[in-house]
Image (cartoon, rainbow, N blue to C red):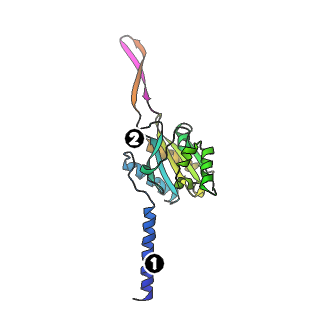
């Protein structure tokens, strides 16, 4: 066997080893909720069209926890880091960018760092994104890598079904004045919202509006508990 053949074999083996390590770094655990394949197809398409499948980007969908409906938890994710099933992230209204959007404006952008340490990154999240020290301590090292986070509420009619968050390690992928990108994210969130399972108890509250000549009119509102 000549030297070139040996070198080629070694390079191939090294490549397989590195690929295996990269694959092992991605957490493929199943999501905690039943999320349809159409959700993942839309996320994959957006990843391709908006970011050219950059490995510096990940998409996460947060929705109310079935056991604690006043808290958001990840239910679907594509990209780097922990799978949604293994994530410890939990946010109430006003906490983190997901909680800010869930209970406030329909879209938000956070620019973070770069920071010299994870301690600095956690402190910034506490101050800017209204996290308690306990919640900030639970943020993973993967989450603290993000230098830009875009969040859009998943509104289905007047029903906030959850929040779409896009984490970017490379801030150049989300230029500060790129309004077009933000509009695309908002449209993506609107298309995803009807596909996200709801967890709140619902009922129709009907009230009499008018009765006359043997006829009646009632109007109703949809009431949802646990939001």
Relative to 130, residue 201 above or below: above
Q: Secondary structure at mark 1?
A: helix
Residue 55's spot in the image, x, y percent?
50, 60
**Residue bearing the label numbered 2:** 197
| Dominant SS type (magenta) | strand
State whether residue 205 is above or below residue 29.
above
> Quick one: label 2, few (<14), some, or many (20+) residues within 10 Å?
some
Q: Secondary structure at mark 2?
A: loop
* Furthest residue in direction top, as rendered: 213
- Tag 1 and tag 2, C-beta contact below 8 Å: no
Q: Position of residue 138 (x, y in %)?
A: 52, 48
Marker disc for residue 178: none
**Please, is residue 221 above or below residue 102 in the view?**
above
Residue under the image location 48 percent in, 39 percent down: 71
- Find the magenta span and give its range: 214-227
157 vs 141, nearest the viewer:
141
Would you call the spot at circle 1 few (<14 residues within 10 Å), some (14-19), or many (20 or more)?
few
Q: Quadrant of the N terminus?
A: bottom left
Which residue is denoted by mark 1 in the rendering? 11
Marks 1 and 2, the one that precedes in the sequence: 1
């Amino acid at each position: 066997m000549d030297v070139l053949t040996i070198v080629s074999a070694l390079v191939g083996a090294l490549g397989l080893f590195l690929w295996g390590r990269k694959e092992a770094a991605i957490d493929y655990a199943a999501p905690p909720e039943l999320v349809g394949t159409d959700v993942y197809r839309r996320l994959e398409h957006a990843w391709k069209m908006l970011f050219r499948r950059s490995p510096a980007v990940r998409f996460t969908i947060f929705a109310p926890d079935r056991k604690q409906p006043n808290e958001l938890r990840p239910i679907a994710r594509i990209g780097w880091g922990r799978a949604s099933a293994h994530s410890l992230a939990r946010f109430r209204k006003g906490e983190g960018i997901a909680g800010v959007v869930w209970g406030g404006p329909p879209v938000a952008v956070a620019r973070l760092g770069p920071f010299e340490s994870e301690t600095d990154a956690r402190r910034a999240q506490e101050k800017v994104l209204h996290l308690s020290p306990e919640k900030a301590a639970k943020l993973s090292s993967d989450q603290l890598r993000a230098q830009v986070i875009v969040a859009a509420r998943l509104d289905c009619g007047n029903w906030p079904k959850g929040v779409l968050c896009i984490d970017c390690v490379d801030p150049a992928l989300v230029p500060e004045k790129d309004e077009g990108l933000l509009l695309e994210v908002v449209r993506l969130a609107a298309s995803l919202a009807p596909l996200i399972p709801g967890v709140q108890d619902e009922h129709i509250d009907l009230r009499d509006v008018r009765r006359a000549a043997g006829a009646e009119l009632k109007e109703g509102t949809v009431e949802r508990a646990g939001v």
